[in-house]
Image: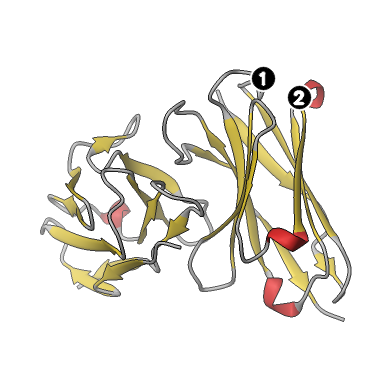
Amino acid sequence: EIVMTQSPATLSVSPGERATLSCRASQSVSSNLAWYQQKPGQAPRLLIYGASTRATGIPARFSGSGSGTEFTLTISSLQSEDFAVYYCQQYNNWPLTFGPGTKVDIK
Amino acid sequence: QITLKESGPTLVKPTQTLTLTCTFSGFSLSTSGVGVGWIRQPPGKALEWLALIYWDDDKRYSPSLKSRLTITKDTSKNQVVLTMTNMDPVDTATYYCAHKGNPWEVHFDYWGQGTLVTVSS
């Protein structure tokens, strides 16, 4: 099973600032990586797939990069609605696995 | 417009079998490349993938839970059913069903609202 780790666990950012979230896989997942955003009491929302392709309707301030074992989600200028928990998920191998999440909160 | 909704008991007793139904609209589970998955999330914890069924009835399960899970589909009713046997308090979680639309990749672009299942005597 591929183990996904995310850092930091919590990221405190001021509105308008840039946020950089990291995701690491225990072995290569190529570019088969997705990012999700989850707000309290809501289901996750797909942000990025293929490591760098934005899902339908996702604002351009969200961008993904990386391949192999190291991935990054960048939010270029945090808006109030972006404070949430972010999860990465690999789909290169079965079973599908998610990371533990990074909580982005207001500084 | 794709929508999914989970239904089932909110409370089950230890050792009982849980049956959850995902009723969806806006897509067909007979379309090539489409799938429906189940993911759960214990309170305050991370997401955990459970199972996935494809349009062609191919099924995938989490190895750690495989012996307890069964996923089936009823294409005519637009439903996917997940059963989990021998429920334990550690299985208390919000259970989500989700749509896999990309023919080549396994990520979930539409999710149900989730249903909280509590396991307690």
Question: Dividing the picture into quarters, in which one does residue A22 lie?
Answer: bottom left
The quadrant of the picture occupied by the C terminus of chain B is bottom right
Indicate the secondary structure of the residue bearing disc 2: helix
Q: Nearer the viewer, residue A45 or A65?
A: A65
Residue B102, percent across and down?
45, 28
Subunit ID for the residue under disc 1: B
Instruction: Report the disc number at residue B30.
Output: 1
Residue drawn 56% across the image and 27% down it: B34
Disc 2 marks a residue whose amino acid type is Thr
Q: Earlier in the sequence, mark 1 or mark 2?
A: 1
| Left or right of B9 in this view: A86 | left
Query: What residue is drawn where x is 48% and y is 40%?
Result: B108
Residue A31 horizontal side relative to residue A45, left or right: left
* Residue at image mark 2: B75
Quadrant position of the N terminus of chain B in the picture: top right
- Say whether mark 2 and mark 1 are on the same chain: yes
| Tag 1 near tag 2, CB within 8 Å | yes
Q: Is residue B57 above or below residue A42?
A: above
Q: Measured from the top left, where is residue A68 in percent x and y?
A: 22, 52
Q: Is residue A65 left or right of residue B9?
A: left
